[in-house]
Image (cartoon, rainbow, N blue to C red):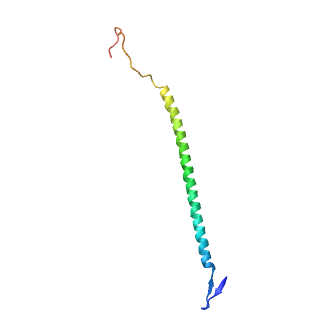
């Protein structure tokens, strides 16, 4: 809708409407960006936790296998010495 002012210039009433619509669209984009970022952060945290848990599980197995193959350790006491064996 265009009105002609007393000065003879054409004025548009849609100028404020355009500004209001752009403001609403900008706010909507900011809200959507916030939710997208929140979902991306949560997804990244879940993915990092899953990878960390898997890494821990695999290294746990490797530690168990290494412990099973390790030499026996413990204390001992000499009961009797044989002749001819070198003292250590």
- Give above or below for 27 relative to 75: below
Residue 84 in picture, x, y percent from top left = 34, 9
Residue 3 in picture, x, y percent from top left = 65, 86
| Quadrant housing the C terminus | top left
Relative to residue 64, is residue 29 drawn left or right?
A: right
Q: Residue at x 55, y 57 (%)?
A: 37
The quarter of the picture where residue 71 lies is top left
Residue placed most toward the observer, 41 or 78: 41
Q: Residue at x 58, y 57 (%)?
A: 36
Q: Residue at x 39, y 19 (%)?
A: 75
| Quadrant housing the N terminus | bottom right
- Give above or below for 54 relative to 34: above
Residue placed most toward the observer, 15 or 48: 15
Residue furthest top as drawn:
83
Relative to residue 37, is residue 73 drawn left or right?
A: left
Residue furthest left as drawn:
87
- Give above or below for 83 relative to 56: above
Residue placed most toward the observer, 85 or 18: 18
Residue 76 in picture, x, y percent from top left = 38, 17
Relative to residue 19, is residue 67 drawn left or right?
A: left
Residue furthest right as drawn:
1
Q: Residue at x 60, y 73 (%)?
A: 20
- Give above or below for 24 relative to 68: below
């Amino acid at each position: 809708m265009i009105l002609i002012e007393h000065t003879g210039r054409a004025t548009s009433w849609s100028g404020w409407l355009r500004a209001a619509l752009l403001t609403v669209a900008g706010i909507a984009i900011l809200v959507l960006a916030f939710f997208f970022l929140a979902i991306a952060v949560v997804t990244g945290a879940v993915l990092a936790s899953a990878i960390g848990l898997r890494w821990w599980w695999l290294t746990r197995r490797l530690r168990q296998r290494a412990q099973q193959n390790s030499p026996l350790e413990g204390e001992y006491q000499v009961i009797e010495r044989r002749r001819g064996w070198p003292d250590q």
